Amino acid sequence: MFFCRGGRQSRSKSTFLLLVILLGAGYFYIRYYNSDQQNQRNGSLFEGREAGFGGGGRAPEPPLEIGKRPGDLGLERKVAAVKETVKEPAKYISALNKTWMTWTDIESPGVYRACVPRPKDDIEMTEVVTGGLVEHSNRMTITHCLHSCIALGFTYAALSRGTECFCSDVRGESPLLNYMESALCDIPCSGEGRYHCGGAQHMSLYRTAVPDNRCSKVELKPVGSLPLVALASYPRSGNTWTRQLIERGTGLLTGSVHWVNEKDMTISKKIFPGGNIDYHSRQTICVKSHLNEAKHIQTFEGAVLLIRNPYSALVAEIFRRQMLDQAKTAEETIQYFNSPEWRNFAENQSRSWKKMAVQWITNSKKIFVAHYENLQENTNEELTKIVQFLNVPVDNQRVLCAVQEHPSSKATGIALGNHGRKTRVYLTKDPFPSEVRKLVDDNIKEVNATLIAHKLTPLPRDYSVEVY
């Protein structure tokens, strides 16, 4: 009897254990399934948050299919009903590249440039890397190499094979500036493994804080000594970058019509000291302006008008307003692109973009049009044209130095990963409704027609509409 009673107890325990397992499996299935469906509806992802070397991350995976087994039909219908009412949000990526180190301090010892080929032999190394191998260490870090090169007075530091620190100066068209994909610099720094210090046949190149004497001297001219020339653009069209190029390329500071609001900002104190003074003093080579009233335009003797594709400029402006001005998260900003406010903004700002261009073209006494995309593609050539328009003698070494000091994001895009800097967020889905896109395209056509009518350089062909 003892044996039979034990058998019944064993069967009871087995039945109970099986029931517990089945209930647990059902619980985790439902929890996982609902979580998966919620993730599909959210639709946003940080591709590249920990994306390794490429910076761009993986492409979004397709939604998991709903099972067709009995018992799932009710849940499937509920999910389908939700999908009908919830608009799929815009997707984005935030780029991160492990091969480069970021600084938030303006006084930082250096900035990452690119992954570049390592000279193949000692002779080529001597020709390309002017300072040679400074240190070989099993505790190598990026910061240590930068400070070593700064102490020796070199403008560039290059790390290779995880342990090597080279120093160099750059003159002319150096092979050291052959920017390549950062994934090729894939060996962790021996002293700080979370960052990479070059590769077996490549070097991680950094610009140190040592001034380049070819274009480091930039001055403010005496009161009343320069003509009043504007550097006009719709916001987020490359005005800051172009000002940096112009200052280095001419040796003269630039100003801003917005100086009253900007003079206490860190960027004006540290980067653009010419923006701290009243621009009417005529001490700067050109003056930043985002204004488009005819009366304002006519106060200038000439203007450099910087034009950027409005599709790019409008999206960039939203990211600035939401993430910088309002301290919104990337997720909150992405949600904005699904709101009625975004549609109103895109319509209104598209008209502002058009007005900015048309007003400066038609009301300027003398004008040079610089297309942001052309400046990105051929920085040296386009900067030379701007310097000539500003009536400053062209110093080829100074212009070359300016381009090396402030390379275009197109030149460094591959170097920093597919999508550039860590702090930037990029949409992976078109946020413009079709009717808004039609309005933007019409405005593009009108601006292009105005350029052609005034015998100015037409818009680049890589805009989102055929404009010729």
Image (spheres, rainbow, N blue to C red):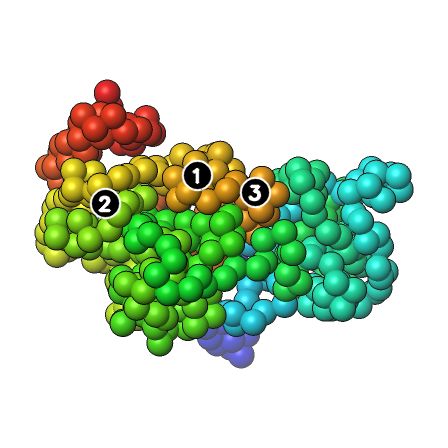
Quarter occupied by the C terminus: top left
Q: Residue furthest top?
A: 468
Give the residue displayed 69% in from the left and 44% down from the top: 171
Q: Which mark is residue 388?
A: 1
Residue ID for mark 3: 395
Residue 12 visible in the current orientation: no
The image position of residue 197, as x and y in percent, is: 71, 56
Instruction: Give the left or right position of residue 24, taking residue 447 as reference.
Output: right
> What separation in Å lies between label 1 and label 3 (alpha carbons)?
10 Å
Front: mark 2 or 3:
3
Q: Amino acid at mark 3?
A: Asp
Choose between 117 and 243: the one closer to the eye: 243
Total tally of numbered discs in the picture: 3
Label 3 crowding class (10 Å Cα cut-off): few <14, some 14-19, many 20+?
some
Residue ID for mark 2: 431
Give the residue displayed 27% in from the left and 29% down from the top: 456
Label 1 crowding class (10 Å Cα cut-off): few <14, some 14-19, many 20+?
few
Give the residue displayed 33% in from the left and 52% down from the top: 227
Q: Amino acid at mark 2?
A: Pro
The image position of residue 82, as x and y in percent, is: 16, 52
Label 2 crowding class (10 Å Cα cut-off): few <14, some 14-19, many 20+?
many
Give whichever of discs 1 and 3 has the lower sequence position: 1
Choose between 180 and 60: the one closer to the eye: 180
Which SS class for mark 2?
A: loop
Q: Quadrant of residue 179?
A: top right
Which SS class for mark 1?
A: helix
Q: Amino acid at mark 1?
A: Gln
